[in-house]
């Protein structure tokens, strides 16, 4: 099924993960899905937006308009690979992001919603194990997440760990949508 034809009915009651390289439209697709869920009515939803602020044209929060059936959790996140001066600083920034995400996850788990959207799940996995995301999946019947799964931001130990954890996260999902590179 092509991503642009995904509807709320296709995703309800499932765990869905949208993957791709940087700048392929993962956040735009998730934003469209969130809007479609809200327009369809029904349950109260939540968005956990883990994206960093826009840095060198990469990242950026979803910036959805306020909606009475959407609760947004959005910690301050930095892009470790794009802002860290060396591997040590990259690891420190990722750890600080992990702590910020852990706080937000705790808030969400205190009052989970039937429908959860997660923007940039891969950022959490830079410094944390999959179990944190698994707890969110268990708390909500419908989850639609996106995350980076590519090579553009480099490999090495940091990138390889993130990629391995994303593969573990994929295995917890009912459906994975891979977005192709945009030429």
Image (cartoon, rainbow, N blue to C red):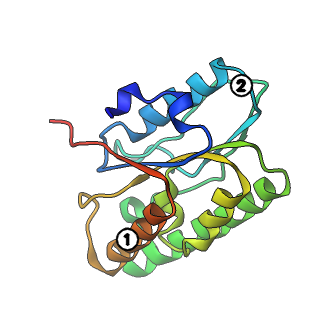
Q: Nearer the viewer, mark 2 or mark 1?
A: 2
Q: Which quadrant is the C terminus positioned in?
A: top left
Q: Could you tell me which residue is drawn at 43 percent across and 32 percent down?
A: 28
Residue 65: x %, y % from top left: 65, 23
Q: How many residues crowd mark 2 within 10 Å: few (<14), some (14–19), many (20+)?
A: few
Left or right? Give the position of 48 relative to 148.
right
Find residue 162 and report its image quarter.
bottom left
Q: How many residues crowd mark 1 within 10 Å: few (<14), some (14–19), many (20+)?
A: few
Q: Residue furthest right?
A: 110
Q: Which quadrant is the N terminus positioned in?
A: top left
Residue 175: x %, y % from top left: 44, 49
Q: Is residue 168 above or below residue 50?
A: below
The answer for how far apart the CA atoms under marks 2 and 1 are is 36 Å
Residue 100: x %, y % from top left: 67, 63
Left or right? Give the position of 72 relative to 33.
right
Find residue 132 and report its image quarter.
bottom right
- Residue wearing tag 2: 66
Q: Could you tell me which residue is drawn at 55 percent across and 75 percent down?
A: 129
Q: Is residue 14 above or below residue 25?
A: below
- Residue wearing tag 1: 85
Q: Quick one: SS at disc 2?
A: loop
Residue 4: x %, y % from top left: 37, 27
Q: Quick one: SS at disc 1?
A: loop
Left or right? Give the position of 137 relative to 7.
right
Sequence-wise, the earlier of marks 2 and 1 is: 2
Q: Is residue 174 above or below residue 171?
A: above
Q: Are marks 2 and 1 in contact (CB under 8 Å)?
A: no
């Amino acid at each position: 099924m092509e991503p642009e034809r995904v509807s709320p009915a296709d995703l309800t009651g499932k765990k869905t993960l949208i993957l791709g390289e940087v700048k392929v439209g993962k956040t735009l697709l998730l934003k469209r899905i969130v809007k479609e869920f809200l327009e369809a009515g029904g349950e109260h939803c939540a968005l956990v937006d883990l994206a960093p602020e826009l840095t060198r044209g990469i990242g950026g929060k979803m910036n959805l308009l306020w909606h009475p059936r959407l609760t947004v959790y959005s910690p301050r996140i930095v892009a470790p690979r794009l802002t860290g001066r060396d591997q040590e600083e990259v690891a420190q920034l990722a750890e600080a992001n992990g702590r910020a995400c852990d706080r937000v996850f705790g808030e969400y788990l205190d009052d989970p919603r039937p429908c959860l959207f997660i923007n940039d799940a891969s950022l959490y996995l830079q410094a944390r194990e999959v179990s944190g995301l698994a707890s969110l999946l268990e708390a909500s019947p419908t989850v639609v997440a996106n995350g980076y799964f590519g090579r553009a931001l480099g490999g090495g130990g940091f990138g390889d760990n993130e990629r391995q954890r994303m593969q573990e996260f994929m295995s917890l999902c009912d459906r994975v949508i891979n977005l192709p590179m945009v030429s």
